Amino acid sequence: MVVLLSPSKTMSSDDPPKLLEPSQPQFMEHAKSLMTDLKKLDVKDIEALMKVSTAIAEQAQERCAEWDPPFTNENAKPAAFTFKGAVYTGLNARSWSAEDMEFAQGHLRILSGLYGLLRPKDLMQPYRLEMGLKWPNTEAIKNLYAFWGNQLEKTISAKASGVVVNLASHEYSKAGHLKSMDSRVITPIFKDLVKGEYKALMAYAKEARGSMANFIIQNRITEPEEIKGFVGMGYRWDSSLSDANTWLFTRDKNSLAL
């Protein structure tokens, strides 16, 4: 079973726990190719490409300039401790034991516009590159979905043993071609009761995705039915709103009065 997560735009500056055996991203040569193109862009180009402010574009360009493999413990950090945001608050990788980390290394994959797929211990350097972007100044690559093609799908399928738990956003899961995958793809959805109706509140839903990934890792879950036992953040599986592969987890308590 493979669990998929999205990356985050924000990166942590905290030092990671010491790991004895960090790993390298599988698609490092692809990342180098993409970064070669990104390094050619000036701040205005990045603003236009990413549709971001000048300040964010300047940070993105600085990250491009500093991006320099090969990755080591001195110039890079493991992916599980580099991404920051609601999903990674829920994932809470700093709570993992060494055994948790090894299980996660085998079963958790983070989709990435630059790196393709990352395992938790894969070393990485900070970047900003969303999967849905069009690609500039080239006829060969229309966008990152075209760049990655079906490579990510093949890699995920080879590891999945028939089951993929999709906790990634639509933007990133699209890169895995999950709809055409031979494996069973289970997509958990998290919704809160708001004024008598269940709605996805993304700030909470993102954290819940990470929390479910953490639940799978710390409980060594390899049978999908066991995921229905997740009760993190007060969410519970709702059989009446779920179907075979789209599983609704709902929360009534602590709902926001919107």
Image (spheres, helix red, strand yellow):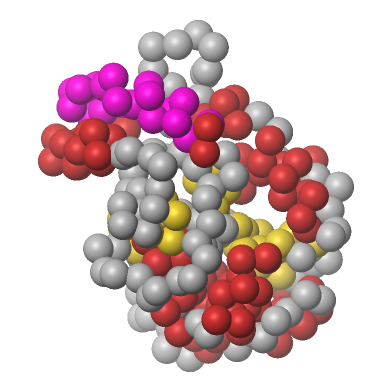
Residue 160 appears left or right of 12: right
Q: Position of residue 49 (x, y in %)?
A: 32, 26
Q: Residue at x 67, y 86 (%)?
A: 219
Q: Residue at x 24, y 34 (%)?
A: 65
Judge whether 201 appears above or below 111 on screen: below
Q: Magenta stretch mostly in which secondary structure?
A: helix
For the C terminus, the image quarter is bottom left
Q: Position of residue 198 (x, y in %)?
A: 55, 73
Residue 245 lies in what quarter of the image? bottom right
Judge whether 66 appears above or below 135 on screen: below
Q: Residue at x 28, y 19 (%)?
A: 40
Q: Answer yes or no: is residue 139 visible.
A: yes
Q: Residue at x 29, y 63 (%)?
A: 12
Judge whether 256 appears above or below 75 on screen: below
Q: Position of residue 122 (x, y in %)?
A: 50, 56
Is 115 within the magenta?
A: no
Range shown magenta:
30-49
Residue 153 lies in what quarter of the image? top right
